[in-house]
Amino acid sequence: MSEKIGFIINPIAGMGGRVGLKGTDGVLDKALQLGAHPVACQKAEEMFREFSTLSKNHNNLLWVTCSGVMGRTVLEAAGMKNIQIVYSPSGDTTTAHDTQTACKRFLDQHLDLLVFCGGDGTARDIYTIIDKKLPLLGIPAGVKMHSGVFGINTYATAKMLLEFINKRLTIGDVEIMDLDEELYRKGEWKVRLFGVARGIIEPTYIQVGKACFESVSDEEVKDELAEHVKDELEKYKDWLFLFCSGGTIDSIAKKLHIEHTLLGIDAIYQKQLVGRDLNEEQILALLKKYPKAKILLSPIGAQGFIVGRGNLQLSPTVIKKIGIDNFIVVATPSKLIHTPLLRVDTGDKKLNRLFVKQGYFMVVIGYRLSRVVRLQTNSF
C-alpha cells in the first residue's frame, strides 16, 4: 500500500443550514422537526467518486475509518477498496465524543493524511485530539466553514487529495476557526482562532480564513451602496428582494430603515419586511406569492464565497426559481482588494456549471458603479 489515509464523517453536519438554524450543534432535534435532511454523507460520497474518476491508483490506498455512517458506508458506496475499521460508534446518533475517540485511534495508525467531512465544529473536535500530529483535509459539508482546512467544494477537495498523494502539494499551517453558534443564532458574529493545524497548501483549491475590513471611508461607500439598492427597490417595486447575511448587507438595510437579521436572510417587498430569518421552505413559500425576486448578497471577505457559506437557505431549488441573472452582488472596494475572485458552492453540479458559464459577476461598489469580478471556474 502506498498511502494510509484516514477518513471520518460527521453525519449530522450541515443539517441546520437550509432550515435556517445556522448550524447543528445542540439543535439536532429541532433541525429534524423542521424537516432537515442529512447532507454530509452525500457530500463525502460525491468527493470520493470524483477522486476515483481522477485517480488511476486509488485502489492501492488503505482507508482507515469508522464503521457505518461515520466512514465505511460512504467509502463502500463510492467504490473504495482496502478499508480498515478502527472505531465503531455505540449509538445510532454520533457525537463529538465519537469523533474524538476515533481520532485517538487514528493516531495509532501512522496515517499520512486525515480526511474528514463536516464543518468548523467537526474541525474543532478533530483538532482537539490531532493537534498538529497529522495533516487535515476537510470536505465542506457544514453550515459554518471558516477554517483553512476545507476544499472549496467536493471537486476541489478530490483534486487536492490526488495531488497530495502524488506528492505535488506541501503541508503548512492552517487556521482552525471557532464561531459561537449560540451567539450566531442570536445575530452576533463572534469568531476566534481556535488553533493552528497542519493542512494542505494550495491557494487555488483551499479557502482562506475570513478577514474583516473596517475603515471610516467604507461608511461613505456603504451610503452609496444603500442609494443604489434603494433605486433597485423603487425600479423593481413589484419584486421580492432577499437580503442575505453579512455586515455590508446589514449596513445597507439599516441605512434604508429596514429591519435585518445580521446572520440570516430576510424578505423585503415594497420596502417592507415580509419575512424574517427565513429558511429554505419559507423562502420557497414566499416565491409562490412573489414569483419575481432578486437576491442581494455580499462575498465573504478573503474567501470570496457568495453562495454556499453561511447561506445554505439559498438552496439549488431557490436559486433556480430566482435565476442567476437576478443576483445583486455588492461589496466595498477595500473588500474586493482582498477578494480577487468570487466562488460558489451550490451543492448542485449542473447549477454550478451555469455559474461557470457566466464566468463573472458585476459587483456593485458604489452608486451606479460596478466592477467585473471573475468567478472561479477551475474547481467544478
Image (cartoon, helix red, strand yellow):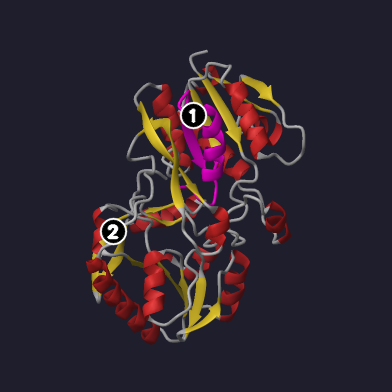
Measured as percent of width and height from the top left, residue 368 is found at 24, 76
Tell me whether the residue at label 1 lies in contact with that at label 2, contact meaning CB atoms closer than 8 angstroms.
Answer: no
Q: Identify residue for label 1.
A: 131
Number of the label disc, if any, that sits on residue 198: none
SS for dot 2: helix
Which residue is drawn at the image coordinates 52% and 28% (left, top)?
A: 130
Extreme residue in the top direction: 1
Quadrant including the C terminus: top left
Q: Is residue 129 above or below residue 148?
A: above
Residue 119 visible, this angle: no
Would you call the spot at circle 1 few (<14 residues within 10 Å), some (14-19), or many (20 or more)?
some
Q: Identify residue for label 2.
A: 335
Can you tell which quarter of the image residue 118 is in?
top right
SS for dot 1: loop
N-terminal-most mark, 1 or 2: 1
Which amino acid type corresponds to the residue marked 2 in the rendered image? Lys
Measured as percent of width and height from the top left, residue 326 is found at 41, 71
Determine if the magenta segment contains residue 316: no
Identify the magenta region: 117-146
Determine if the magenta segment contains residue 122: yes
Q: Nearer the viewer, residue 145 or 26?
A: 26
Which amino acid type corresponds to the residue marked 1 in the rendered image? Asp
What's the distance in space between the residues labelled 1 and 2, CA to CA?
32 Å
Q: Is residue 121 above or below residue 136?
A: below
Q: Nearer the viewer, residue 355 or 107?
A: 107
Can you tell which quarter of the image residue 162 is in?
top left
Q: Nearer the viewer, residue 90 or 48?
A: 90
Image position of 52 (left or right of 169): right
Measured as percent of width and height from the top left, residue 52 is found at 51, 30
